[in-house]
């Protein structure tokens, strides 16, 4: 790799692959009311399914892309997945019913799973240990810029071209990524290191992950962290609109929060080598528990609208900050013992955590009652469970020699 792509350029490319997911979700947020009004006027709330259908496809596709990349190489799988993503975005752009749009979004999520999963496997091919965690953290920091500007970009595209223009931007974004990768990144998985696509080998790899206690706990905590993030994403636009009457300024506040929380990955990159991944995740989850309890307590008081809005924005920032300090570390903890089956490991980790997180977020989102209470109590429960699991991981590590 070094003869064509520097470490900085590699990190930027990986960040763009990661960002495909955030761009595909966050830029849709300001479009949901308009799509609901046009394609589902009898029940505009069905437009929320545009987010969850994409996540469903993402989780399903994640089961397959890793093993396929182990068998056929990293780059070919990304090419096929990106082609499906672009084609599905074109179908969504041309759709005249919500049902067709939702089907297209499912397949778009399946296609998006390729750059998401395989990018993590590529990092594991080339790096390991805390250096891998540093690379992931820096990539996540750059990736934060995309969700920060995605709602504003989506709002701008809606103003200029209508909501369909967002799907055209998806096609362009993905095309730029795969052309960049094709020209600059050599195939990182040598032919002699590939694993045949055989069911017994896949079952054996899955058993290795399930029976490894650190990997198993890391997947569970990652599921809870993603569940908190997805729940916030599903409910954040209605909260800005209904609770705080700030729908028009939502894209700008969302961008501000994402930029502020983007420093989390930079901070993690600076601390992870010295403190270690597990300790950082544990401390951050503990801090989130305290912050959420404070939000619930203060929200029960008769706060002024200004203070109430400031409290929610601060809490939203803290939650996004938590994601930046935990997701890369949890991925690294789970992937580190699985370097010999990196593609399969990335698939299992991503699929389980994504599908279960979406299953957690969807019913909590349906509990929205015009207040932040369902969101706050849901996040408190998930945070507490994650904190307890990380403490248990620490006890396991204390019993097992390095």
Image (tube, helix red, strand yellow):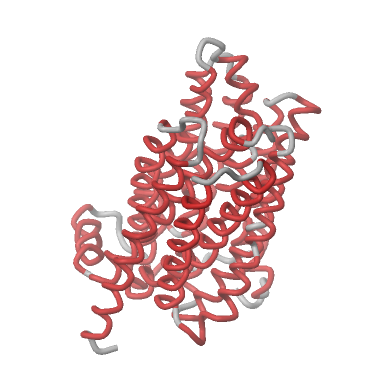
Residue that sits furthest to the bottom in the current view:
401
Q: How many marks?
A: 0
Residue 338, x across and y down, in percent: 33, 71
Horizontal and vertical percent position of residue 178: 62, 51
User: Does residue 36 appear in the picture of this structure?
Assistant: yes
Q: Nearer the viewer, residue 257 or 124?
A: 257
Name the residue located 38 percent from the left edge and 74 percent from the top edge: 336
- Say which quarter of the image contains residue 270: bottom right
Quadrant location of the C terminus in the rendered image: bottom left
Q: Position of residue 12 (x, y in %)?
A: 66, 64
Which of 318/331 is in front?
A: 318
In front of the other: 193 or 238: 238
Q: Quadrant of residue 222?
A: bottom left
Residue furthest out toward the right: 160
Residue 190 seen in this snapshot: no
Q: Is residue 107 left or right of residue 333?
A: right
Figure check: 303 above or below 161: below
Farthest residue in the top direction? 42
Q: Is residue 206 above or below residue 396?
A: above
Q: Is residue 203 left or right of residue 292?
A: left
- Name the outermost residue toward the front: 302
Please provide percent x and percent y for residue 253. Answer: 70, 46
Q: Is residue 76 above or below residue 242?
A: below
Quarter of the image with the N terminus in it: bottom right
From the viewer's perspective, tell me whether residue 198 is left or right of residue 237: left
Residue at screen point 36% across, 58% down: 349
């Amino acid at each position: 790799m070094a003869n064509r792509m520097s470490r900085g350029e590699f990190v930027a490319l990986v960040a763009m692959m990661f960002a495909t997911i955030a761009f595909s979700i966050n830029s849709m947020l300001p479009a949901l009311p308009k799509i609901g009004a046009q394609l589902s006027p009898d029940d505009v709330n069905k437009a929320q399914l545009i987010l969850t259908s994409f996540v469903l496809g993402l989780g399903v596709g994640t089961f397959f892309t890793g093993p396929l990349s182990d068998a056929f190489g990293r780059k070919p799988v990304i090419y096929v997945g990106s082609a499906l993503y672009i084609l599905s975005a074109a179908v969504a752009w041309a759709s005249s019913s919500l049902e067709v749009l939702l089907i297209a979004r499912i397949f778009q999520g399946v296609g998006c799973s390729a750059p998401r999963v395989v990018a993590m496997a590529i990092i594991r091919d080339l790096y390991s240990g805390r250096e891998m965690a540093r690379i992931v953290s820096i990539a996540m920091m750059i990736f934060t810029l995309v969700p920060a500007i995605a709602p504003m970009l989506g709002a701008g595209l809606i103003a200029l071209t209508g909501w369909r223009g967002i799907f055209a931007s998806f096609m362009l974004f993905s095309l730029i990524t795969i052309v960049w990768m094709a020209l600059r990144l050599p195939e990182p998985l040598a032919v002699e290191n590939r694993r045949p696509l055989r069911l017994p080998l896949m079952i054996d790899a899955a058993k290795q992950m399930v029976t490894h206690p650190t990997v198993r706990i890391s997947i569970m905590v990652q599921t809870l962290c993603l569940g908190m993030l997805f729940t916030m994403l599903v409910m954040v636009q209605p909260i800005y609109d209904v609770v705080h009457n700030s729908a028009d300024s939502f894209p700008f506040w969302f961008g501000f929060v994402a930029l502020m929380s983007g420093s989390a990955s930079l901070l993690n990159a600076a601390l992870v080598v010295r403190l270690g991944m597990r300790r950082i995740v544990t401390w951050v989850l503990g801090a989130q528990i305290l912050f959420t309890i404070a939000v619930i307590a203060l929200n029960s008081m008769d706060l002024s609208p200004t203070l109430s809005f400031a409290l929610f924005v601060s809490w939203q920032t803290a939650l996004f900050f938590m994601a930046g300090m935990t997701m890369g570390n949890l991925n690294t903890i789970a992937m580190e013992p699985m370097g010999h089956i990196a593609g399969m490991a990335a698939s299992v980790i991503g699929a389980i955590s994504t599908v279960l997180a979406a299953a957690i977020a969807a019913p909590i989102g349906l509990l929205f009652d015009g207040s932040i209470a369902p969101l706050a109590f849901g996040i408190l429960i998930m945070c507490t469970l994650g904190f307890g699991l990380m403490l248990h991981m620490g006890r396991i590590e204390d019993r097992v020699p390095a």
